[in-house]
Image (spheres, helix red, strand yellow):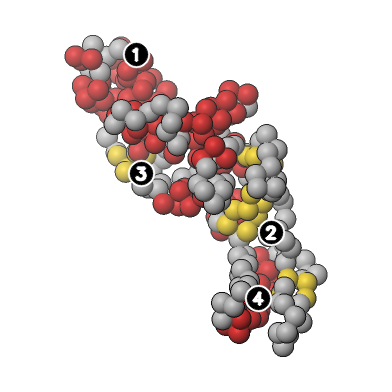
Amino acid sequence: MNNRIRSIIQFFLTPKDDYTHLKPIGIVDGGYRTKGGVGFKSMDGYKKEAYDIKDDLTDDSKRIEILDKLNKDIRAYNKWSDGRLEYPNLDEYSPWSFLVVRADLEYVDKKLYVEIIDEELYKLKDDDPDFVPRFNKSIYDYIKLQKQSAEEDGRWDEKNIWYQPFRSFGDWFDKNPSDAEPYQLGFYKTDITDALYTIADDLTIDVCDKGTKKFRELVEACEWWCERHTHKGKNKTAHQLTRAFYKAKSEGRL
């Protein structure tokens, strides 16, 4: 199981784990933000007064330094409050927090933005012009794996928690086709160095009907392989595998 993707998915869910709220993103915020702004929100009666942060937090090193100091004040306050109901604990701030908006601009629990905390994605969001489709495809690929697993177990229907997210992401890509590669997000693939055409040939034996090498079955098998493997350190597509297979076949190597 890819725990990193699951942790990212959790940011989209309500406290009741409603997976219908897991939808593609359409907007990513370019600057540092956190829910409720950035500052020390102590209650009356504490020795240190509340304050807001006015500094520019777009620089990574400066943001980390400032938030480290802010979090020290928060930890000291939480220790002082000691869980008392009249002095609720304050949440610490992550230096890698950014906001996204679901593609349909849906409000969930009266909130429009989804806060995501992930260092790699935080750094990529400003530098990669394909961030939105690549982010969506990373989640969508994971959902497709869950769909495949559920189908194998006979659990795939409208009641499955991944059913609505699968439709939402699929509809988004129907409207927004993209060749952008998904981010790996901690999904470690097995690297294989065998020739591509021999890999595809082995797949026909493993999954195709009685070795007839039906084209659709071959494509599906190659898609499955590409989700789990790299070839000599690089991601490959099902098209590349099938092309290598039929080229080798036409040249008499198979």
Mark 4–mark 3 Cα distance, whole angstroms, equals: 50 Å
Disc 1: which residue = 215
* Residue under the image location 25 percent in, 18 percent down: 208
Local crowd size for mark 3, using a 10 Å CA cut-off: few (<14), some (14–19), many (≥20): some
Residue 189's disc number: 3
Vertically, is 224 above or below 86?
above
- Say which of marks 1 and 2 sits in front: 2
Residue marked by disc 4: 86
The mark closer to the camera, 2 or 4, is 4
Q: Amino acid at mark 2?
A: Lys
> What is the CA distance from the residue labelled 1 to the residue labelled 4?
66 Å
Question: Which is more N-terminal, label 3 or label 4?
Answer: 4
Q: Report which residue position mark 2 lands on.
A: 35
Closer to the chain start, of discs 2 and 4, is 2
Which quarter shows the C terminus?
top left
Q: Position of residue 176 (x, y in %)?
A: 63, 27
> Helix, strand, or loop for circle 2?
loop
**Residue 123: which disc?**
none
* Image spot of residue 250 (x, y percent): 30, 12
